[in-house]
Image (cartoon, helix red, strand yellow):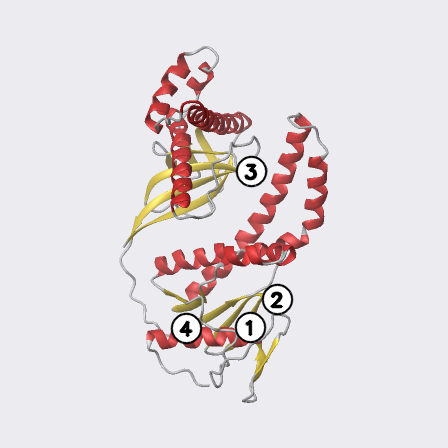
Amino acid sequence: MIFTKTFKYRLCPTSSQRSLCAQFAGACRWVYNRALDQRNTLWTNEKKTISRFSQSNELVFLKKEEETSWLKGIHSQILQQALIDLQRALDHFFRRVKNQEVPGYPKFRCKGANESFRYPQGVSAQGKKIYLPKIGWVKFKKSREIEGNIQQVTVRQEGNNWMVCVTCELEKPDPLVEFKSVLGIDLGIEHFATLATETGIEEIDNRRFLTKDLKKLKYLSRRLSKKAKRGQNRLKARIKLNRWHAQIRAKRADFLHKLSTLLVKSHDVIVVESLQIRALLVSASKYLARAISDMGWRSFLEMLKYKCREYGKKLEAVGQYFPSTKQCFSCLKRNDIPLHQREYSCSCGFKIHRDHNAALNLRAAGMSVLKLVELPR
């Protein structure tokens, strides 16, 4: 089995290395914005376009000009990667137009937001140091070993820290797993997840990372809105707001990674709902949509997907029209239940929390698909 895996670490650069990282990220942002502006202007004036390869060839001439000679100090391949990112964004735009989806035309990159650059090759790691071309050997917090062959390396800024993401290709033998332990997971708002196992029901608390810091975020957003545009004070306010958002994302990602790893290692089969999260966000109210976004359901499901593949476990997703909440776990009768009603009650006398009923139905559906032992009712 061959698959790719990304290892993420926090860099410990010196002051000069930190300055070089900021310069490299700024150069990528400048190349990206220049190429996007060139394409927009060419299409507006002449109804023509320009290929990525032509724009890549222009970088050679830009380095020879006096105004842009500073590009000589930047690694050439990371500048080309910025053009690849633009081409990929345009390809996705035309794909969405063809499929009659919301297009989302590429936007210009802003300073202080999503600062990053990528090396396609030339990176090596030794001990607790990693070699980045034209930056040198940089120390990093080695929390685990890097496995496999390095394919590419992305350096990005998160808050006040610089992170390195090492994407590797691994080859492992297919693990032999007997599908015995089945887990049903119902994602919700009151509780992050309700787990149905062979021993009973377990509830995972909703941590509400965004809600806890919402007051601080509103304060920083008001400070940002009052700063003069294109001024240094506005840039400082945006960086401070981005750092706070980065802390919230880091806490949420830490919680999701630990929970998903624990569930995958302790169960052989995991059954979830195939949620249409984008549709839920569009149809929900402002407060409900914020609560759904704060949960991180999509990230959690993606973590379950690739971790199940890595550990040889099985992830089953029932159809989006499966009535996990409406169907009675005891007699299989369907009963309409409004969102505000938290207790499920059936005419057969079965009463249970609605999330518990949904989790049990998901586990039963997964077992019926896999043709495992019958679940007692």
Please name the residue that numbered disc 2 is placed on: 190
Q: Which three-letter amino acid code belongs to the residue tagged 1? A: Asp
- Number of the label disc, if any, that sits on residue 182: 4
Residues marked 2 and 1 touching at CB (< 8 Å): yes
Tell me the SS state at disc 3. strand
The quadrant holding residue 266 is bottom left
Tell me the tag on residue 161.
3
Q: Which residue is mark 1?
A: 355
Is label 3 or label 4 in front? 4
- Measure the alpha-carbon separation of dots 2 and 1: 9 Å
Give 110 or 126, whichever is nearer the viewer. Answer: 110
Which circle's residue, 3 or 2, is located before the other in the chain?
3
The mark found on residue 308 in the picture is none
Q: Position of residue 86 (x, y in %)?
A: 42, 33
What amino acid does circle 2 point to?
A: Glu
Q: Earlier in the sequence, mark 3 or mark 4?
A: 3
Q: How many labels were placed on the picture?
A: 4
Question: How far separated are the C-alphas under marks 1 and 4?
Answer: 17 Å
Q: Amino acid at mark 4?
A: Val
Name the residue: 26% across, 57% down: 173
Q: Secondary structure at mark 1?
A: helix
